[in-house]
Amino acid sequence: MKVVTTAEMKELERHAAELGSPPEVLMENAGLAIAQEVKRWLGSIERQQILVLVGPGNNGGDGLVAARHLHDWGARVNICLCQPRRAGDPNYRLAQERGIPSIGANDDLAELDNMLSASELVIDALFGTGKLRPLEGVHKEVLTRVREAKEARHNLSIVAVDLPSGLDADSGATDPSCVAADLTVTLGYPKLGLFAFPGGEMVGQLVIADIGIPPSLGQDISTELVTEQFMRSMLPKRPPSAHKGTFGRVLVCAGSIHYIGAAYLACEGAMRVGAGLVTLAVARSLQPILAAKLTEVTYVPLPESEPGFIDAQAAEVLHQWLPGYDVLLMGCGLSQHPSAIQFIRNSLLQMPPNLAPALVLDADVLNTLAQTPGWWQKLTLDAILTPHPMEMARLADLPIEEVQLDRLRVAREAAARWQKTVVLKGAYTMVASPDGGATINPAANPGLASAGTGDVLSGAIAGLLAQGLSPPAAAACGAYLHGAAGEIIEAELGDAGMVASDLLPALPAAIKKIKQG
């Protein structure tokens, strides 16, 4: 599923018109889709009180079409015009012919309050993907009254048409008057701003409505929303004749005296997505501790500079083991101990070219690279980098505020500059590839904001990469499975108290659910 900017959406609509689907056809399709989603949301709409807030443009037209259908299906619909419609507007005329009550917000705010107090649901059809402007005057007043009504009656549902009014479709910035929706029915394609904050907090449940734009028109759009359909097409096959080598071999180099659990979580993450063999290269003194917990993993004990910290010269041992593995996952919990930093540099920046495993790099590897000028020119192998926002800020030498303000742009520019696949973690994880392609993971789960969940994600990506997926596909699928596992645990436990190890048994459950459709 493509994700579009405002400019891309306008181009799609223009091309659709050239192919025989003019704006009035798209508007009719959009209004019907909105009405159907409202009906689904309410369960039954017979005699339900619904208020439609109608803006001046096409978004308002979509709302008028929805109002007509809902009225015809038995709902009690009221219309509030926040600006007069153009003379002869056919959708407003059809609403009037049906006797649907309407008021002008400029004329009768007291009646608007009465309509709000009697309504079970409000459809916000004020502004769509047009240029975001500060909401002032009657529009600001109407949305303020809707917010006050919602605060007074929590069972009042808000349904946004395309996106909540006052949310920028490109950046996710929000006007102070923007009202959070319970359900957003976005039209044709999801908009980029729905997956950026603070706008992402205003969307509620997101539904993507088909309005009749031919899918072929969006083929060249380079940003994708990862969906279950995408996942079913990408997940590795599991032939009955398989053996452990069929599903790839992952060498995980992780852990230190202060971060023993990171090694455990990364290894388990790789195994739980189906990797055939996982081996842990770890400081020698930590191996007995981890062996008590990781019974399915094999081990490469590495020399230490002091107990719990890998020695810089251990890179030679690591290199000796690499030919037997498809993927090297490195970084989780290695620490920033001086010997660990030098070990990382010796391992990656002095790697013999004939070894050339696929790389997944996380945590302390990223922090070490950030301290290494021109590191991407020295690390010529294909790699997936998995930074959280602070690690991304260090790697890209940017303020963290800039990273978070435009996550997709930052990830894309970094991937192109470094020629690596970049996984910018966080709510709506972004994956950018060197060729300019990008994916957005639809999950934004506060339950995943706890220590160790990133180690599970890196392990999952490495496990999928070992099974033959390309680096961008492995990264996108790993992020999706990680989010889906989080949703499974949230459904059982809620979004507080979830810990990283909870995700491990949920990963295969998520795979099963996706495969079963």
Image: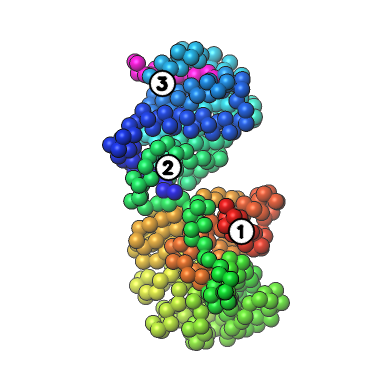
The image shows residue 467 at horizontal and vertical percentages of 51, 70
Q: Could you tell me if the residues under marks 2 and 3 are in contact, i.e. CB atoms within 8 Å?
A: no
Mark 1 / mark 2, whichever is N-terminal: 2
Q: For mark 1, what is the residue?
A: 512
Residue 87 is inside the magenta segment:
yes
- Residue 322, disc: none
Residue picked out by circle 2 = 189
**Residue nearest the viewer, comparing 444 with 30:** 30
SS category of the residue bearing label 3 = helix
What span is colored magenta in the figure? 77-89
Image coordinates for residue 407, horizontal then vertical, percent: 43, 52
Q: Nearer the viewer, residue 9 or 340?
A: 9
How far apart in space, not on screen, are marks 3 and 1 (Cα)?
Answer: 46 Å
Tell me what residue is drawn at x 66 percent, y 76 percent: 296
Judged from this view, the residue extending furthest toward the left is 18
Identify the residue at image location x=44%, y=66%. Answer: 471
Residue 410 image point, x, y percent: 40, 55
Residue beneath disc 3: 91
Q: Amino acid at mark 1?
A: Lys
